[in-house]
Amino acid sequence: MKIAWGITGAGHFLRESVDLLKDLKQKNNHLKVTTFLSRAGEEVVRMYGLEDELKTISNGEYLEELFPESGQGASVPKAGRFLLHKYDFLIVTPATSNSVAKIAHGIADTLVTNAVAQAVKGSVPVYIVPVDIAGTIESQMPYFIDREICMKCEFCPPQEQCKKNAITDQVQLLECSGCGECVKLCSYGAIQGGMAKIKVRDVDSGNVQILNKLEGITVIDKPQSFPDSIL
Ligand SMILES: Cc1cc2nc3c(=O)[nH]c(=O)nc-3n(C[C@H](O)[C@H](O)[C@H](O)COP(=O)(O)O)c2cc1C
């Protein structure tokens, strides 16, 4: 079985999505997974320290490639694979409110939204796990420095030892690889990755409802709900 996996730039459900794909691969030795990573997805995956795990899921062989959007052209030629029926299905998890809005309104101008459009046009089933469905969600944040705890030490071990030079007076998230070493190195516990409460906007809930009615697309409420029977 060969599947395509679209990852967009959401921190919410990201860990769970990676775990789902790892689990599916463990259950099915012959499963091949091609990963399509949106531009924001590239950054967010790195911030949460999950880059290496993606490489264990998509190891670079044919139909097991990892396609970051930054390496693709605007016309996204690789999405043509859906029209050639190279994949049994496409799963997009996690799906940001941005990508959900685009898909709901027929927009296909990014790697992942175009993959969805081509999959539907090629009659390849699409499963989407939106992060913003309804109510309030609790989401893991990337690392940040708590200014109330930070002692502004003259010698700051996290800053000195960060391999990515990602620590100034803040954690520079675009440089951060999410390794978490800095958390251990600060004796005051000033570097953390806390939880944030996020209110789902009505417009985002509405877009999920639109998505629910679109041809060829099945909405799944969380990665853990993905039915094994599909494989
Ligand atoms: C650390 C981090 C976490 C984010 N998490 C989410 C999220 O959970 N849900 C969401 O809709 N957007 C989230 N975003 C914002 C998206 O990355 C942003 O809207 C981006 O434009 C989405 O592009 P894409 O849909 O093409 O991936 C997050 C951004 C950052 C920096």
Image (cartoon, rainbow, N blue to C red):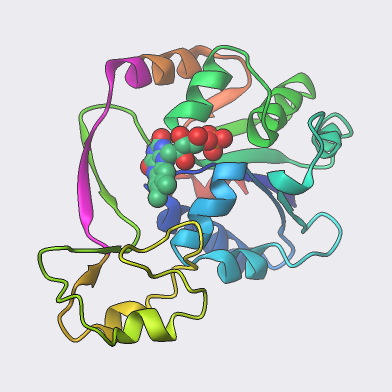
Q: Is residue 128 visible?
A: no
- Residue 190 appears in which quarter of the rendering? bottom left
| Residue 204 vertical position relative to residue 165 in the rendered view, above or below | above
Residue appearing at x 36%, y 21% in the figure: 204
- The residue at 51%/63% (across/down) is 175
Return the x and y of residue 199 as percentages of the image width and height: 22, 31
Name the residue at 43% across, 62% down.
48
Q: Is residue 9 left or right of residue 158?
A: right
Q: In this image, 115 relative to 227: left or right?
A: right
- Position of residue 120 measured from the top left corner of the image (x, y, whole percent): 71, 22
Q: Position of residue 68 (x, y in %)?
A: 70, 50
**Residue at the farthest right position:** 84
Which residues fall within the magenta stretch? 193-205
- Residue 2 lies in magenta, yes or no? no
Q: How many marks?
A: 0
Left or right placement of residue 153 versus residue 33 in this view: left
